[in-house]
Amino acid sequence: MTLIAIAANYLDPENYSLDELKVLARRDDDDEEVRVFKSELRQALRDPSQLPGDELFESVEYSNGSDERFLRWLWHELYGDEPSDASVLTKLKALPEPYTGRLHWKTGYAVRAAADAGEWDKALQMLLAGLAESEASVSPAENAELIALMAEVGLPAAAVAAFTCIAAGSPHSSSSSTG
């Protein structure tokens, strides 16, 4: 798989070079191998079970805790808000990615624990509270994704409306990050 080969080449702990991988990823219009990498990353985000065994983890040795978290982190690092076509289940299993850097570490840990336990509504509620508490900003695409995930797990519309006010540029949102 091109995804695993490129990830191993640039993200192996002994040869870690995320910045060089970002440069490579920007060449997706000019390079067939990079187009295949991006396509395979999209496919893996739609269905991580298609990855061959533990090959990705063994090649990269990521500390995100799951293939889903690593894949969401990688997509966000390389392509930002560009739609990834990740499945709803992948997005839920990946929580708190890609928001980890904007949360207090204790909140990130709690969100991750809830997601690992399959408590999606609890994970989302803690994530939203953590983003609001840290006054972290979210992009319009992230805001739309969070609202869709909340609707998917059946959170009440009031929670969606309350978060929308915070995320949509109210005076309480900022670009600060808490670690």
Image (spheres, helix red, strand yellow):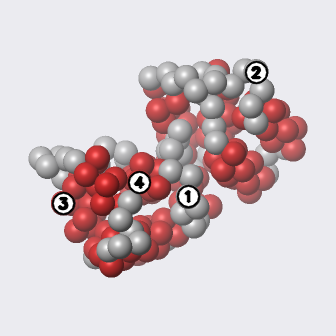
Q: CA distance from mark 1 to mark 3?
A: 23 Å
Q: Residue at x 47, y 69 (%)?
A: 42
- Picture mark count: 4
Q: Residue at x 81, y 41 (%)?
A: 160
Q: Alpha-carbon neighbours of circle 1 within 10 Å: few (<14), some, or many (≥20)?
A: few
Q: Nearer the viewer, residue 23 or 91?
A: 23
Which residue matches tag 3?
9
Report the amino acid beneath label 3. Asn
Choose the circle earlier in sequence order: 2 or 3: 3
Q: Alpha-carbon neighbours of circle 2 within 10 Å: few (<14), some, or many (≥20)?
A: few
Which residue matches tag 4?
78
Report the amino acid beneath label 4. Leu
Q: Alpha-carbon neighbours of circle 4 within 10 Å: few (<14), some, or many (≥20)?
A: some
Q: CA distance from mark 1 to mark 2?
A: 26 Å
Which residue matches tag 2?
171
Q: CA distance from mark 2 to mark 4?
A: 29 Å
Q: Residue at x 12, y 47 (%)?
A: 14
Query: Which of the 4 image quarters holds residue 82?
Result: bottom right
Q: Mark 3 near mark 4, Cβ–Cβ under 8 Å? A: no
Query: Which of the 4 image quarters holds residue 89?
Result: bottom right
Which residue matches tag 1?
82
Choose the circle earlier in sequence order: 2 or 4: 4
Q: Residue at x 56, y 52 (%)?
A: 81
Labels 2, 3: front one: 2
